[in-house]
């Protein structure tokens, strides 16, 4: 069996064997990717151009859209190229780059979602201290911490994963390079080191999850004490989209990596991977724009009605 020193490429999991289905999957992925580019790009442009949206909440939303664009661009373009050219191979260096970038963007997204929960907590539970606790410098420092910690986490996971000798072939049971799939190819007990790092990351992730839950418990208690129905509606309109994004992100990631082996199968692993790697970046812009009247009005100003009338 080949060792990692002789492994020059990996084989990704094919969605279908027939050419027609491959082209169908290419068109489907292309539509999802274009929707993600349009939605996240529109949020980034709107927040950057509209001075009324230069607030901590929208600053973090802009960063989230950047991370979403990065994560979906790490996996889908390579898959679309594989469908189009009928080749499911990826180079060793390309696989390492994909693992690093995907871990970087996903880790950054989770850190940023935790920060956004803190932003909503301060805005609703401590409104008089909002300007002090979430000034421009504090927001930049928190965003930099999210990106920086994600970079170090991704670098650590990638270095450990690709330092392992591989002797179980080079076929990955996923449509992109994923750390658990690469660990299955290892023939050394040193893979336990990477497992230990994953467990440590999960513990940190659980701590962030507890922080998010406690933040929203306090938020909902404060919102329910608001006397006016209009005030409650406005508070919920800024919190529910974030809570929906957090729920979608966590539920799919946790199920993907912690589901019982008894229900694991290649087709189920593929579907779950699509749910946590492709769906959130594509639907997050839609979730945030549906209940956010301020954002919808800003987008309406950015795209005048005359643009649609020409079409």
Image: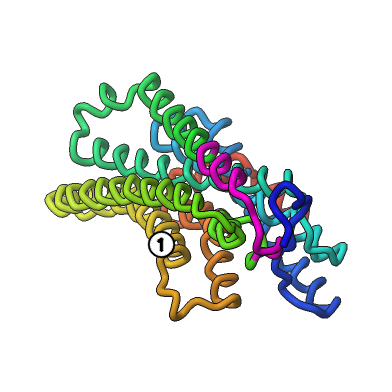
Could you say whether the residue bearing mark 1 is in a helix, strand or loop? helix
The front one of 19 and 97 is 97
As drawn, is 107 to the left or to the right of 301?
Answer: left
Determine whether, in the image, residue 96 is placed left or right of residue 214.
right
Q: Is residue 171 magenta?
A: yes
- The location of residue 248, given as percent across then percent down, is 43, 61
**From this viewpoint, is residue 136 visible?**
yes
Please name the colour scheme applied to the rendered image.
Answer: rainbow
Q: Nearer the viewer, residue 310 or 245?
A: 245
Residue at point 45% right, 52% down?
Answer: 192
Most distant residue in the top direction: 137
Which residues, given as a range, are shown in magenta? Answer: 155-172
Give neighbour class at mark 1: few <14, some 14-19, many 20+ (Cα, 10 Å): few
* Vertical position of residue 142 compared to residue 249: above or below: above
Q: Which picture quadrant has residue 88?
A: bottom right
Residue 261 drawn at (x, y percent): 44, 75
User: What residue is shown at x 47% (from left), y 44% (from top)?
Assistant: 107
At a point 75% along the width and 77% down the height, the residue shown is 16
Is 253 magenta? The answer is no
Picture coordinates of residue 32, whole percent (x, y): 66, 61
Q: Is residue 53 above or below residue 184?
A: above
Q: Main secondary structure of the magenta part?
A: loop
The number of callouts visible is: 1
Q: In front here: 129 or 152?
A: 152
- Where residue 43 appears, as percent x and y from the top left, is 56, 43
| 59 left or right of 310 in image | left
Residue occupying the point 54% across, 37% down: 155
Which quadrant, please, contains the N terminus?
A: bottom right
Q: Disc 1 designates what residue?
A: 254
> Does the image show residue 30?
no
Q: Which picture quadrant has residue 269?
A: bottom right
């Amino acid at each position: 069996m080949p060792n990692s020193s002789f492994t020059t490429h990996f084989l990704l999991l094919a969605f279908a064997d027939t050419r027609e289905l491959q082209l169908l999957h290419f068109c489907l992925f292309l539509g999802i990717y274009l929707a993600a580019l349009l939605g996240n790009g529109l949020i980034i442009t709107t927040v950057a151009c509209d001075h009324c949206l230069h607030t901590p909440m929208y600053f973090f939303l802009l960063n989230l859209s950047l991370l979403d664009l990065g994560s979906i661009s790490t996996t889908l373009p390579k898959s679309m190229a594989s469908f189009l050219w009928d080749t499911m191979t990826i180079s060793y260096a390309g696989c390492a780059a994909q693992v690093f970038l995907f871990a970087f963007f996903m880790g950054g997204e989770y850190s940023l979602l935790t920060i956004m929960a803190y932003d909503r907590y301060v805005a609703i539970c401590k409104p008089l201290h909002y300007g002090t606790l979430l000034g421009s410098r504090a927001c930049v420092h928190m965003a930099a911490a999210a990106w920086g910690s994600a970079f170090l986490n991704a670098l650590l996971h990638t270095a450990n994963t690709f330092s392992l000798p591989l002797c179980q072939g080079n076929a990955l049971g996923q449509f992109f390079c994923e750390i658990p799939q690469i660990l299955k190819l290892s023939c050394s007990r040193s893979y336990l080191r990477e497992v230990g790092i994953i467990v440590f990351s999960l513990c940190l992730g659980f701590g962030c999850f507890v922080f998010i839950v406690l933040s929203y418990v306090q938020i909902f208690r404060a919102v329910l004490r608001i006397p006016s129905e209009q005030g409650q509606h406005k508070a919920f309109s800024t919190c529910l989209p974030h809570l929906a994004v957090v729920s979608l992100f966590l539920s799919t990631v946790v199920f993907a990596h912690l589901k019982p082996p008894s229900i694991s199968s290649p087709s189920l692993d593929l579907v779950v991977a699509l749910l946590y790697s492709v769906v959130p970046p594509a639907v997050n812009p839609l979730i945030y724009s549906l209940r956010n009247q301020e954002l919808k009005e800003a987008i309406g100003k950015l795209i005048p009605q005359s643009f649609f009338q020409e079409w």
